[in-house]
Image (cartoon, helix red, strand yellow):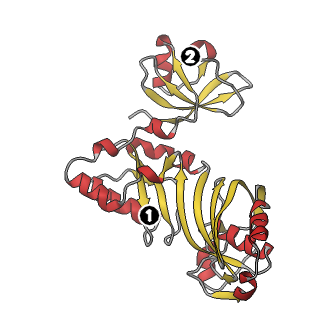
């Protein structure tokens, strides 16, 4: 069984679950999970966890992500992308927009942003997924959710199309951002295409398509492409158990300052996450610092 991460390039037409299902067949193992859903029509980076790495799926899903999107101005649809039914068409108005007004509209979304999740999404309301209700022709009230747009850049304007790059927090719907930007401009808008360029520290440049992974596995050459779990955890500072505390960490016990060493003095904030290693440098798991009692408690154990 493989334990680690593999950086998959999800192609259009696959769901994230499809990717996992096919990988299970290719790698001949069941313990596989992805780190954040991509719409079937979207493509790009989909980091996948293998074996013990599946314990990190939820943690890595919470990371910031980066996208390249094509916004089609002048049209709104019921799905907020071009796969849906057109509900508004103001293409003529979109064609009259100035480049400056488009750039200003994009910049207006920088920072905190209260976004209403789309009806065509996997979020649940009273136990039912929104997209299931939408397919029944039902619309329900959705509470806005606070998301963060860390960076947004207008790369190209070819009206009615605008190419955007976006660096954002978890839970941000780029489809909704496109529609909201179109409404700010007074003509409506929807997403025509989406590529995720970065997620959980993984980028497009190192990703592999499923056919490539299948070929490598068939040739017995896949192992070098199975990345160690540390690859996705380098943003967390490292701490090391002293030899006498190895027994504590190997059994998933908390550690106090007297039990650990670190390279430099880590900034210790309540709830901050750390990579915990034993005294020999073996990765134990992710530990969370608790300021009240000045100790580290295990959050996710990664021992095989």
Assign the N terminus to one quadrant of the image.
top left
Q: Determine if residue 89 is in view.
A: no
Toward which corner of the image does residue 164 lie, by quadrant? bottom right
| Image coords of residue 251 (percent x, y) | 47, 25
Q: Nearer the viewer, residue 241 or 183?
A: 183
Q: Is residue 189 left or right of residue 52?
A: right
Q: Relative to 275, say whether 191 is above or below.
A: below
**Label 1 vs label 2: CA separation?**
40 Å
Q: Nearer the viewer, residue 62 or 182?
A: 182
| Image coords of residue 114 (percent x, y) | 78, 61
Toward which corner of the image does residue 104 lie, by quadrant? bottom right
Give the residue at mark 1. Answer: 17
| Image coords of residue 252 (percent x, y) | 51, 28
Q: Determine if residue 211 is in view.
A: yes
Assign the C terminus to one quadrant of the image.
top left
| Image coords of residue 218 (percent x, y) | 21, 54
Label 1: which secondary element: helix
């Amino acid at each position: 069984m493989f334990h680690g991460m593999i950086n998959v390039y999800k192609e259009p037409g696959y769901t994230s679950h499809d990717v996992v299902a096919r990988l299970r067949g290719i790698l001949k193992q069941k313990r596989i999970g992805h780190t954040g859903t991509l719409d079937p029509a979207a493509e790009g980076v989909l980091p996948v966890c293998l074996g013990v790495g599946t314990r990190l799926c939820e943690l890595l899903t919470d990371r910031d992500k980066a996208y390249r999107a094509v916004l089609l101005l002048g049209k709104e649809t019921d799905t907020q992308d071009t796969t849906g039914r057109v509900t508004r068409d103001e293409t003529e108005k979109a064609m009259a927009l100035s480049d400056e007004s488009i750039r200003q509209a994009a910049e207006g979304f920088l920072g905190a942003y209260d976004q209403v999740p789309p009806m065509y999404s996997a979020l649940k309301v009273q136990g039912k997924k929104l997209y299931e209700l939408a397919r029944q022709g039902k619309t329900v009230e959705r509470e806005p959710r606070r998301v963060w747009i860390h960076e947004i850049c207008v790369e190209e304007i070819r009206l009615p199309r605008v190419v955007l790059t976006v660096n954002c927090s978890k839970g941000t719907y780029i489809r909704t951002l496109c529609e909201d930007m179109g409404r700010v401009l007074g003509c409506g808008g929807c997403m025509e295409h989406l590529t995720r360029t970065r997620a959980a520290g993984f980028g497009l440049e190192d990703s592999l398509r499923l056919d490539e992974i299948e070929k490598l596995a068939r040739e017995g050459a896949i192992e070098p492409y199975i990345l160690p779990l540390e690859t996705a955890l380098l943003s967390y500072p490292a701490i090391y158990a002293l030899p006498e505390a190895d027994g504590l960490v190997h059994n998933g016990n908390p550690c106090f300052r007297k039990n650990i060493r670190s390279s430099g003095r880590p900034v210790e904030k309540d709830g901050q996450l750390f990579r915990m290693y034993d005294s020999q440098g073996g990765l134990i798991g992710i530990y969370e610092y608790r300021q009240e009692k000045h100790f580290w408690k295990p959050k996710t154990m990664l021992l095989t």
